Amino acid sequence: MRPTEDSYRHKGLRKKLVDIIRAKGITDETVLDAINNIPRHFFLDSAFDEQAYEDRAFPIGEGQTISQPYTVAYQSQLLGIKKFDKVLEIGTGSVYQASVLAELGAQVFTIERQKKLYERNKQFTWLLKKYPSIKFFYGDGFEGLPTYGPFDKIIITAAAPEIPQKLLQQMKPGGFMVIPLGSGEVQQMLRITRTASGEFLEEKFDHFSFVPMIEGKKD
Ligand code: SAH
């Protein structure tokens, strides 16, 4: 069962979590506010109430995880979200990252390759009411959403073995893609910018550990 109550205790734990993330180097106050505003325990079973506010990833079933809050904040900060940005997310998972982006004012399009995880979101009534603009898709993130693009920003929340070429084509000029690149245990965070003249620039950031981005859909 998902919890539905956001108590003072939860709010207090969340403030502490925000302090931890700030101490680790996140400086964008809009991102920190978004983390502070979203009851992360709603994204987990009520049995994991306490763990929801630890700064770590947590299993959500189907071999997948809800990303670590610091990682969510880090990727969100690199994306530099502006209100009404059209954002494509690869790897819906628990929908926590998508919610942070929606809280920042983005129009989020999110793709999940696992049907069970995709189906589960349809029963997440609090989320559907709170962020009605998030659009969910069951599909392969390597393909992106050509009919909905181009996007201002693209975020990949699984370890990408290579830069998905089809996604580069779905970026607007001036747009960013934030992608953890690598096929081993750890990946390096990259930010790719598509310049106005159509070139792609790469900036390299810290190392993280994501679950793998896998080609094709899973029933
Ligand atoms: N953004 C999520 C993180 C989930 S973990 C959150 O906030 O909870 C990564 C997710 O990416 C998993 O759910 C996994 O099933 C999904 N995934 C892996 N490869 C994918 C692909 N090719 N297309 C879409 N989703 C993919």
Image (cartoon, helix red, strand yellow):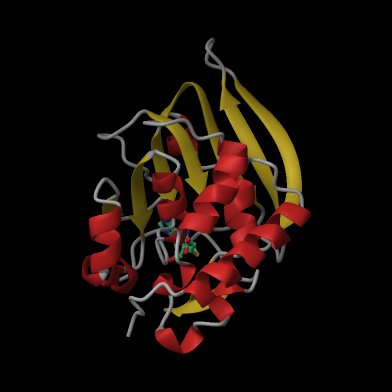
Quadrant in which residue 57 is drawn = bottom right
Which residue is rendered at x = 64% and y = 59% of the image? 18
The answer to whether residue 177 shows anywhere in this view is yes
In the image, residue 109 sits, relative to residue 9, either above or below, namely above
In the image, residue 105 sits, relative to residue 38, either above or below, namely above
The answer to whether residue 63 shows anywhere in this view is no
Residue 189 rendering spot, x and y as whole percentages? 68, 47
Q: Residue furthest top?
A: 197
Residue 148 rendering spot, x and y as whole percentages? 27, 35
Quadrant in which residue 105 is drawn = top left
Residue 131 rendering spot, x and y as whole percentages? 30, 52
Considering the image in quadrants, where does the C terminus appear?
A: bottom left
Which residue is rendered at x = 42% and y = 65% of the image? 93
**The image quadrant in which ligand 1 is located:** bottom left
Quadrant in which residue 204 is drawn = top right
Considering the image in quadrants, where does the N terminus appear?
A: bottom left
Which residue is rendered at x = 61% and y = 63% of the image? 15
Give the left or right position of residue 218, taking residue 103 as reference: left
